[in-house]
Amino acid sequence: MSNGDIFVGEIIGTAILILFGAGVCAAVTLKYSKARASGWIVIAFGWGFGVLAGAYTAAPLSGGHLNPAVTLGIAVDTGEWGKVWVYVLGQMVGAVLGAVLAYLVYLAQFQANVPEENSADEPTPTLGIFSTIPEIRNPVANLVTEIIATVALVLPVLAFGLTEGLGQSGTTVLIVSLLVVGIGLSLGGPTGYAINPARDLGPRLVHSFLPIPNKGTSDWAYAWVPVVGPLAGGALAGLIYNAAF
């Protein structure tokens, strides 16, 4: 795979991932959305389908990593580091693009996110549409959650590569997307399961500069956790895989 193919593939695939993921969060969160308050299961499946669509689209060009933690885990296992920067740069650009596209899809809902006259309803918080927010703010606990959840993603992804039938059938990406749904349902409660530095950092940047009414803070004090945790988890998964398989 050429650097150009990898870069373009990761931009497109990650943009699709974030369009679906931020899109489902907007759908469930914002007032005047037909899916408002439809719940965590809808969010988990929305992100899973985002992985499905993004990774299948990117696979012919880049292999469809869509996640610096996955790229890092593969590099730690194989020792091949030369193209890591291309993958990560494409993933970051794609994450920013996908967040902007999700914003445009729900533009009218974002613009309507203002206090209503003579109403006690507060504007809907918007950061959670773009990035993760812990339910209990405890940096150590939050970091541990992200590390464990990312190992639970990257280690199976690496192991799926050994399952010949999955590769021949073309269902590897489908299985990974279901894995992401499972992580969301089982491990996503404490932090919102970033498990992907680009997925959190790119949209957080977009949240910080978009003209969203009543958007509140972008919470940069927490932003290091969903970057460091998944990177540590991805590296740890690569080490475990290299040692055990």
Image (cartoon, rainbow, N blue to C red):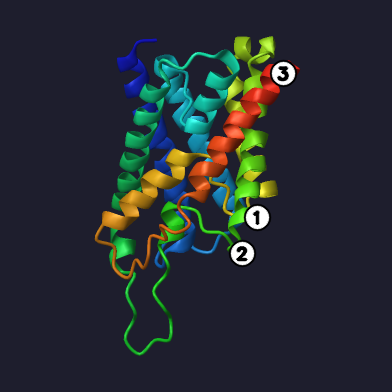
Q: Which mark is residue 141?
A: 1
- Residue 106 in view, yes or no: no
* Vertical relation: 73 (above or below) 98: above
Q: Nearer the viewer, residue 113 or 81?
A: 81
Q: Which mark is residue 243?
A: 3
Look at 64% across and 29% down and name the residue there.
237
The picture quadrant where one finds residue 70 is top right
Residue 185 appears left or right of 115: right
Give the position of the N terminus as an image quadrant.
top left
Give the Cα distance between marks 2 and 3: 34 Å
Residue 169, image x and y in percent?
Answer: 62, 13
Q: Residues within 10 Å of mark 3 (few under 14, many from 20)?
A: few
The picture quadrant where one finds residue 163 is top right
Return the residue at label 2.
Answer: 136
Three-letter amino acid code of the residue under disc 3? Ala
Residue closest to the far right: 244
Look at 28% across and 65% down and name the residue there.
111
Q: Nearer the viewer, residue 105 or 210?
A: 210
